[in-house]
Image: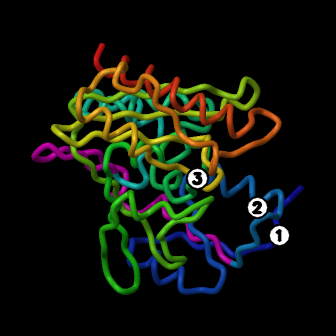
């Protein structure tokens, strides 16, 4: 199937892109790895595609005073190969090989994946686990939104239609790990658990399991604050309410997997 007709414009700057997004039903085009598929299946019918691939300054990775900043146009493959992320935020680099296949990772962008908020994708839960913040630009100026407030539900975020994520920022964790139970066909996460520790802040974030998108497990986080070790989670479970259920796994099965994978992720983080 081919997409419905649409107009195309190449943005010269972030400000120009925001101006173009004022058009009714305009959509941003970055890596296009999710957008093009929805266009071809006619699940999306934008009147205008605003291409931001030529906008400078959005494809950089930097670190400053214990914080990492990743530009929204950084490709998955770029993040995977980044020596800076490998040293200071290996969780990001470790998550990248779980995303699609090489062709997707060479085109897909960090900002695009986070903005799309696929409930089984790696990056939304990874950013949530790292306590990330998102720098957002729009017609009213710039703002910063914490990851805890950004992800609102299934494919739903705090991003307005005329706004753009410019970069993602997060503190460098001391310990972190990711463990995934993939669907054997699609390789999407049936359940995936990210764990990170930075000083007294501990976060456990889950992808693939929630019926309403990625989420944190605060009960696990509180237990790990007493002692950061896999045994601290022994006997702890999460309720099946709110878990997704489909032909690949029931809500009860996913809830069970969250506990199993969380213990494995903590064990990997302290190894």
Please name the residue shown 71% across and 74% down the image. 46
Residue position for label 1: 4
> Would you place residue 228 above or below residue 154 in this image?
above
**Of the image marks 2 and 3, the number of the one nearer the N terminus:** 2
Closer mark to the observer between disc 3 and disc 1: 3
Q: How is the image coloured?
A: rainbow
Magenta range is 48-70
Assess whether mark 1 and mark 3 are in contact (beta carbons under 8 angstroms). Answer: no
Q: Position of residue 122 (x, y in %)?
A: 52, 40
Assess whether mark 1 and mark 2 are in contact (beta carbons under 8 angstroms). Answer: yes
Element assignment for label 1 = loop
Q: Which mark is residue 39?
A: 2
Q: What's the distance in space between the residues labelled 2 and 1, CA to CA? A: 7 Å
Q: Residue 213 carries which label?
A: 3
Please name the residue shown 31% across and 74% down the image. 143
Q: Say how many tags the image has.
A: 3
Classify 10 Å Cα crowding around label 1: few (below 14), some (14-19), many (20 and above).
Answer: some
Q: Position of residue 216 (x, y in %)?
A: 44, 47
Please name the residue shown 39% across and 37% down the image. 220
């Amino acid at each position: 199937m081919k997409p419905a007709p649409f107009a195309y414009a190449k943005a010269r700057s972030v400000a120009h892109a925001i101006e173009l997004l004022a058009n009714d039903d305009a959509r941003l085009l970055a890596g296009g790895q999710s957008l093009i598929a929805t266009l071809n299946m006619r699940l999306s019918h934008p009147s205008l595609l605003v291409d931001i691939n030529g906008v400078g300054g959005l494809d950089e990775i930097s670190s400053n005073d214990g914080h990492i900043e990743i530009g929204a146009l950084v490709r998955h493959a770029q993040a995977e190969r980044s020596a800076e992320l490998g040293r200071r935020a290996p969780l990001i680099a470790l998550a990248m090989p779980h995303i699609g296949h090489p062709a997707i990772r060479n085109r897909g962008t960090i900002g695009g994946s986070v903005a799309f908020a696929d409930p089984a994708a790696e990056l939304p839960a990874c950013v949530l686990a790292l306590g990330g913040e998102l720098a957002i630009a729009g017609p009213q100026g710039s703002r910063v939104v914490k990851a805890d407030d950004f992800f609102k539900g299934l494919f739903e975020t705090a991003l307005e239609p005329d706004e753009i994520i410019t970069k993602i920022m997060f503190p460098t964790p001391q310990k972190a790990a990711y463990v995934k139970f993939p669907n054997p066909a699609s390789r999407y996460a049936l359940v995936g658990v990210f764990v990170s520790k930075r000083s007294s802040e501990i976060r456990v974030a889950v992808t693939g399991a929630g019926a309403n998108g990625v989420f944190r497990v605060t009960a696990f986080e509180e237990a790990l604050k007493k002692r950061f070790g896999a045994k601290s989670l022994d006997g702890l479970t999460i309720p099946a309410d709110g878990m997704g259920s489909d032909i690949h796994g029931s809500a009860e099965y996913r809830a069970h997997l969250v506990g199993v994978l969380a213990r494995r992720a903590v064990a990997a983080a302290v190894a």
